[in-house]
Amino acid sequence: MTKLSLLAGAAMTALVSATAAQAEDTIKVGILHSLSGTMAISETTLKDAMLMLIEEQNKNGGLLGKQLEAVVVDPASDWPLFAEKARELLEVHEVAAVFGNWTSVSRKSVLPVFEELNGLLFYPVQYEGEESQRNVFYTGAAPNQQAIPAVDYLLENEGVERWVLAGTDYVYPRTTNKILEAYLKSLGVAEEDIMINYTPFGHSDWQTIVSDIKAFGSAGKKTAVVSTINGDANVPFYKELGNQGVSAEDIPVVAFSVGEEELAGLDTAPLVGHLAAWNYFMSVDTEENDEFIEAWHGFIGDEDRVTNDPMEAHYIGFNMWLKAVEKAGTTDADAVIDSIIGVSVPNLSGGFSAMMPNHHITKPVLVGEIQDDGQFDIVWETTGLVAGDAWSDYLPDSANLIADWRAPMSCGNFDVAKGQCGGVSQ
Amino acid sequence: MPLGFRAASFPKDRIMTRLTSLFAPILMLLALVTALPGAAATLEELMQRLPQGSYDDRAALVMEIAATGDERAVPLLEALGEGDLQELKSDGTLVRVVKEGKTYTAYDPLTGESLGEIGRRDGKKVKVNNGLRRAIRSALGIMTLRHPDPAKRLEAAEAAFKSGDPDQLEALDAALLAESDREVATVLGAARAVAMLNSDATEADQFEAVTTIAAMGNQDALGVLLPLAAGEGPVAEAAADAVADIERSQKVWGLAQNVWYGLSLGSVLMLAAIGLAITFGVMGVINMAHGELIMVGAYTTFVVQEFIRNTMPEMFGWSLLIAAPLAFLTAGAVGVAIERGIVRHLYGRPLETLLATWGVSLILQQTVRSIFGPNNREVGNPDWMSGAFELGQLTITYNRLWILVFSLIVFAGLLALLKRTPMGLQMRAVTQNRAMAADMGIRTGWVDAMTFGLGAGIAGLAGVALSQIDNVSPNLGQSYIVDSFMVVVFGGAGNLWGAFAGAFTLGVANKFLEPVAGAVLAKILVLVFIILFIQKRPRGLFALKGRAVEA
C-alpha cells in the first residue's frame, strides 16, 4: 500500500515538475475549434490556420524569448462541451490565450468560463453584436461592419427597393435581420417591401422559397435577397437559384455567411454576380495577402485550398495578442486586456486594424461578386476603416449602450442616457 | 472619448452617393448628347476608357460603344460581360484572356487575333458588376436583334424586354418586321410593348401595349403591370384588371406548383427512406447508420466524377449512370460488413442495436472526414440535370424531375426484386418466420446479410441522387435520418407501399403548409401530425396484419 502510494506520489511530482519545466519553456495557446460534428466543416480550417500562424511565429523567435505551444482540443460541435473544453484549456493546460469558437451559441456557452477563470478568447467570426465581454476579443465583423454596408451597397449601386431577408432560424440571423429591418425602415422602406423568411438548419428543399422570392421580386421594383443562411443549407439554396434561373442581374443575393470555403463545394457558373460582404476576400490584391496565401498553401500542402475571412480574423487577432503581450511583457490576462486596446497590426487588405476599447476591431468592408472560378471579385469597399459597434444603433434596446473596457469605465454595456453601467454583460 | 468609437455609418457619404446615382442617368444622357455631334470617338478610343471611372460612368461608356454601331463591339462587350477582359500591366493594352488548363492566352478583343501566351499575373481584370453587366446585356441586345441565330435573337429580345428602354422602339419595330421565328416575335412584341409604356406614346398605343403584356399572363407581365396599375387613368385601370386576371390564374397554378414541389420532396424522402423500409421495416433493425450509408453513396459519386474529370472529361454526362451501380455496391458492401460485424450479434435487442449502429454512424462520418476532409466536395450536375423548363406557369427543374423518375424506378425495381425473384422470396420467408424458413433449408444468416446489404445499397443509390441537390459533406446523412424514420413509421413498417404513400403524403403536406406557416413551423406541424396519427394507428398507414406482426 505505502509503497504504491509512494510510487504514485513520486510519479505525480515528476509529472508536475515536468509540466512546470515545460511551462517555463513555452507559452501555451489554446485552439478551441470543432474538429468533428456539423461545424467541423468550417472550424477545422481555422485550427489549421492557427497552427500555421503559431509555427511561423516560432520560426521568428517565438514570444518573449519562449516558444509557443499549441494546445488543440475538439469540442465536437457540442455547445456544452465547448464550455468544458474551455475550462480544460484554462485550468489544466493553463493556456495564455484561446483562439476559437464559430457559432454564437458556442460562444455564449463559454463566456461564463472565461469570465470566471479570467482567460482570453479571440473570436474570429462575424456575429450579431449586442455583446461586449471583458475577456473576449471580437475580431470578426459586427453587423455594422458587414450587414449594413452591404445593404448600403445594394441601395446605391443596384437601386434595390424590395428586400427579402432570408436566414437560418437561430440567434445570428434573427438579430441581424432585426437590425436590418429597423435600418431599412429608418430609410423609409415600407413594411410590405420587406419579406422575412426563416428556415431550419440544414434545410435542403428550397423550391418553395426560391419561387416565393421570384414572385416577391416580380412586383416591378428592384428586389434583392439578404441572406444569413448558414453553412450547409447554402449549397442547395444556390443550386435551386441557379436551376430556377434566378440570375444576379435580376435578383442579386448578398450573403454574410458564404465565403470561398463554402463555394468550394459548388459549381459557381450559374451564380456569377451574386454577392457577399466580408472584411477580406482571397482575391484581395496586396503583397501581405499573397504572402499569406503562399504560406497557407505551403503549410497545408494543397494549392487548391482557399483562404477566407475568419482566417484573416485569426491572423489579425493572433498578431494583436503577440503585440499586446510584448507591450505588457507578460501573458497575464489582466495586463494583456489593458495593453491590447489601441494595438494596431496590419490586416491582409493593405491597411491596419486596431483594437477598440469595446474589444471589437477596425476593418474595411468589402463587397464581392461571385466569379465562375469560385472566387470573389471585389466590386466595392468602404473608403476607410469601420470600427466595430458592439451595440447596434438601430435597435431601441441597445441604441444607448456603449462598451469601453478602459479604466475608469470598464464596462461592456454602459447606458449613455442613464449614465450607468448595466453590470452583467450579455 | 468613448463616444468617438461608436460606429460610423457615414450618412453624409451615403446621401452624396445616392445623389450621384440619382443624377447618373441624366449625366449619362448629357454625355451621350455631347458625344454625338462630334461622333469622333472611335471604338478603339472608347475601349481604352473601359477600365476607368465608376460603374455608372462605365455603363454609359458601354452604351456609347454600342451606339458606334461597329460590329467589332459585340465580341468586345461579350468579353467584358464574361469578365475575360484584362488590362496588361506592362502597357495597358486591353486583351481578352482565355484560360486553358494552366495556360493563359491573350486575344485582341476586337479582331479575335491571338496575341500569344501571357502569365497569370500579367493582366489586371477589368471589373464588372451586376449593374454594368445589365448595361452590357441591353447594349448587346440592341446590337444582336438581327443576329442570324434565333437563339441569340431570343436572348436579345429578352434583354430588350428587361431594359424596357423607350429609345429602343425603332430598333424593335424594325426587328419585329424582319422576324420570322414565332417565339422570338412574341418576346419582341412584349419588349416593344414595355418600351411603348415607358415612352410618351398615345393612350391608344399604351392600351394596346397593356393588352399585349397581359396576354403573356406570367410573373414577368406582373412585374411590368403592377407599377402601372398603381397610377391613375384608363391605362392604369386596364392594367389593374389585367393584374387581377393574372393573379387569379397564378393562384390556380400555385396549387399545381405546390403539388409538384410536394411530389418532388416526396421522391427525395422516399429515396432516403426506402432502404430503411427494408432494414427497419422488413428486418426490424433500427439502423441509425442509414444516413451515413446515403453519404457513402454520395461520396462514391464524387470519386467517380473526380476520376472521370481527370481521365475522360467527355464522359461527364454519364457520370451519374456509372456512379449508381458503384454506389449501390459500395454502400451495400459497407452494409453487409455492418450486419456481419455488429448487427447479427444483436438481433432481438433493439436498444443495443440502436446504440451500436449510432456508434457506427459516428465512425463512418469521422472516417470520411479523415479521408476526404471536412469540407464540402463538389459534385457537378451533368447538363441534363441542370436548368429548368416551363410548363404553363410552372417552373420544373430538371434535377428534381429526374430524381422523381429515378425514385420511381428504384421503387419499382425493389418491388419486383422482393415479389418476383427467389432471393426476394427467401427474404420474405425469413422475415415472416425465421425458424420455418431455416427448416426449409434457407441459409437465414446469409439472407439476413443480403437483406441488410440490399437496404444499404438502396441508401447508396439515394446518395447518388441527393448529391445532385444537397451538400456532399460528412454531415449529409444526419439530415436525412430523422426524415427517413418518420416516413417509415408513418407509412407502416414492413411494407414498401407504406413507405411510398408515406413519403409522398408527407412531401405534399409539407409543401402545402410551407407557404402558409413557413419552413420551420411546417416541419413542426408535420411532426405533430405524425405523433397524433401514430396514437390512432400505431402501425402506420399500411399496417401488416396476421402472423407476421407477432413474429
Image (cartoon, helix red, strand yellow):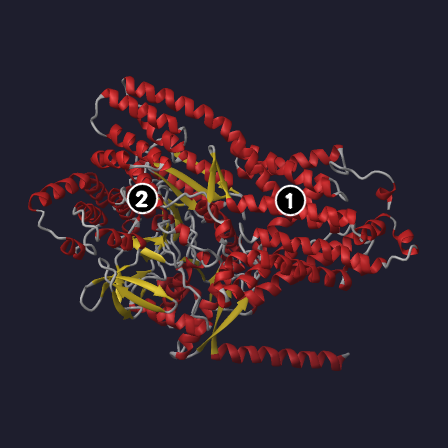
Protein chain holding label 2: A
Q: As drawn, is B451 to the left or to the right of B211?
A: right
Query: Is residue B407 among what the camera can see?
Result: yes
Do tags 2 and 1 sit on the same chain? no
Instruction: Kindly report which numbered mark, 2 or 1, lies closer to the viewer in this rendering.
Output: 1
- Measure how far apart labels 2 and 1 are at the Cα level: 44 Å
Q: Residues within 10 Å of mark 2 (few under 14, many from 20)?
A: many
Query: Which residue is label 1 attached to?
Result: B408
Residue B307 higher or lower than A224, as above or below: below
Q: Position of residue B238 (x, y in %)?
A: 33, 19
Q: Residues within 10 Å of mark 1 (few under 14, many from 20)?
A: some
Disc 2 secondary structure class? helix
Q: Residue furthest top?
A: B234
**How many labels were placed on the picture?**
2
Q: Residue at x 59, y 77 (%)?
A: A16
Q: As drawn, is B440 to the left or to the right of B340?
A: right
Q: As drawn, is B462 to the left or to the right of B399?
A: right
Three-letter amino acid code at disc 1?
Leu
Query: Is residue A229 among what the camera can see?
Result: no
Q: Nearer the viewer, residue B301 or A230?
A: B301
* Numbered label attached to residue B242: none
Query: Which residue is label 2 attached to?
Result: A154
